[in-house]
Image (tube, helix red, strand yellow):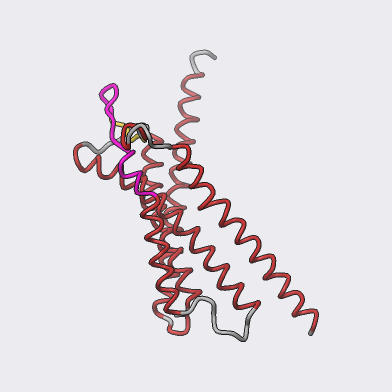
Amino acid sequence: MNGTQPSSCYWNLTAEKIGLTFAYCLIFLVSLAGNAVIAIIVYKTRTMRKPINFLIVNMAMSDLLFPIFSIPRDIQLLYINSWLIDGSLGKASCKLVNFLLHVSFAVSVQSLVLIAVDRFGAVVYPLRSPLISSRLCSFFILATCIVALAFFSPFLFTFKVVEFANELFCLELPWEEAFGEFSSEENYYVSWLVIFIFIPLLLITILLHYHLYKAQVTQDSR
């Protein structure tokens, strides 16, 4: 029994890795196809070219960054727990991968908030002009990208490729090393949680609850 146990564990681990790899590839393909189809439909269909749909496309395009940059890395880490790219390209890719993943998250969250605001205006003030017009929609889409790029720009300085035991690793270094002793990593992450998680969740919850309440009142009055 002792002689067969390592072999059994090896095969179980191999089967688990193969299963996870298949799942990652499936998620990758479905995500690429789904988000791309949304953008194509809105682009090809004139009647779909409305602010609400442009906001959805903005979220879909930001969501594309996640499978493109995250899933290949996750598959690689199943088999090799190190950074494979060396030199200037390796340093740049280490920074960009972590930077763009967080930018994708921030743009998606902001897009969800804007979609909730647009639906709130359509239900609560149906006879008025939309809260987010076509011109404002373009401005807000650009603003979501600028805010996300600016807020997570520190990651371009804190993530570096580090060599340890003849292997390379993409790690986030202490902020004091990148920005000096007066920088506060804790305050940054707290502000990140407040700005991109707590406040959006609170706004979306309030808007959607009022949205549903107003829709129910309208339906009952009929």
Residue at 64% x, 77% y: name it.
Answer: 123
Stretch in magenta: 152-167
Of residue 95 and residue 153, the one placed in the foreground of this image is 153
| Quadrant of the frame with the N terminus | top right
Residue 166 against residue 73 in the figure, above or below:
above
Is 30 or 94 nearer to us in this picture?
A: 94
Residue 180: where, in percent of width, then height? 32, 34
Asked if the magenta segment contains residue 132, the reply would be no
Closer-to-camera residue (212/169): 212
* Quadrant containing the C terminus in the rendered view: bottom right
Q: Residue at x 48, y 47 (%)?
A: 192
Q: Does residue 156 show up magenta in the picture? A: yes
Residue 190 placement (x, y as % from top left): 51, 43
Seen at 25% across and 38% down, the residue is 85
Residue 92 placement (x, y as % from top left): 25, 44
User: Quick one: which residue is furthest to the front in this view?
Assistant: 182
- Left or right, residue 89 beside residue 70: left
Q: Residue at x 36, y 31 (%)?
A: 181
